[in-house]
Image (tube, rainbow, N blue to C red):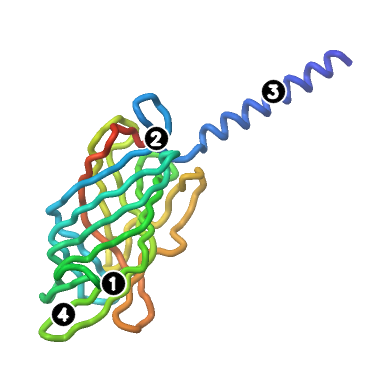
Amino acid sequence: MQRFKVMILAGMAVLVLGATMAASAYAGVEALNAKGEATTATFKGESAEKTTLSILGNTLEVLCAKTKSEGSLETGGKLGTFHIAFEGCDTSVGGTCTGLGDAAGTILALGTLHLATNTALTLGYVLFLTEHLHFSCTVLGITKLFLVLGEALCNVTPINTFTTKLTITCKKGAERGDPETTSYVNDAGKAATLTNALQSSEGDTTETMAAEAGTGAVTVTPEIKLDM
């Protein structure tokens, strides 16, 4: 009987250890400080790389010459907020695109962000959740209103190393309006697919799948490691 009790206790210990290891293994992506603790952080940057917004089935693209971005990661190092000002915006056929209430040629995007990764834990992602964004484009005296909303997954590098510089790259797929990446592992360590992928509409039409392509670098304070 005593031996039986010892075996039960040993089995319970194995189960507890396994649960602890599983919880650790699937703790989710997080930003760590120099002490290895989940941390808050701020980021800011400017980029002269062109950003393109394309809509599935539409040959017209919105092009912005440069971006200014800033934001923060909240306590826990997984979630945060962002402000991105797209400047020098026009279309693939000319004209000027301007966000409602913004300076001419500027489109301000606001929203929240989540850190994420792929199932192999080899890539870092930033999941951008953009608030409803309205802007107008005027070409040859004709003005059209656009609405953009939804989520976009962009690559972030480097990962698993301490740094004060991060590069964020958003990519489209083979077609206009087709995002390259839609599947990820979220901050809770669970496999997921974008449930509200980026969409756009022209005027009062139904929203259609959209994709953003562009690259920008930001300076992060303090130094962090994106731990996959």
Q: Which residue is mark 3?
A: 13
Task: Name the amino acid type tagged 2.
Answer: Thr
Q: Which residue is at a point 21% across and 68% down the rendered structure image?
A: 102
Q: Earlier in the sequence, mark 3 or mark 4?
A: 3
Q: Position of residue 27 (x, y in %)?
A: 50, 37
Q: Which residue is mark 1?
A: 55
Give yes or no for contact between labels 3 and 2 (Cβ–Cβ under 8 Å). Answer: no
Q: Position of residue 150 (x, y in %)?
A: 38, 64
Q: Quadrant of the C terminus?
A: top left
Instruction: Check disc 4: other Cα within 10 Å, few if <14, some if 14-19, many if 20+.
Output: some
Q: Which residue is mark 4?
A: 138
Q: Nearer the viewer, residue 118 or 79?
A: 79
Q: State the separation of the CA atoms marked 3 and 2.
A: 32 Å
- Is 5 displayed left or right of 116 in the figure? right
SS for dot 1: strand
Give yes or no for contact between labels 1 and 4 (Cβ–Cβ under 8 Å). Answer: no
Instruction: Check disc 3: other Cα within 10 Å, few if <14, some if 14-19, many if 20+.
Output: few
SS for dot 3: helix
Task: Name the amino acid type tagged 3.
Answer: Ala
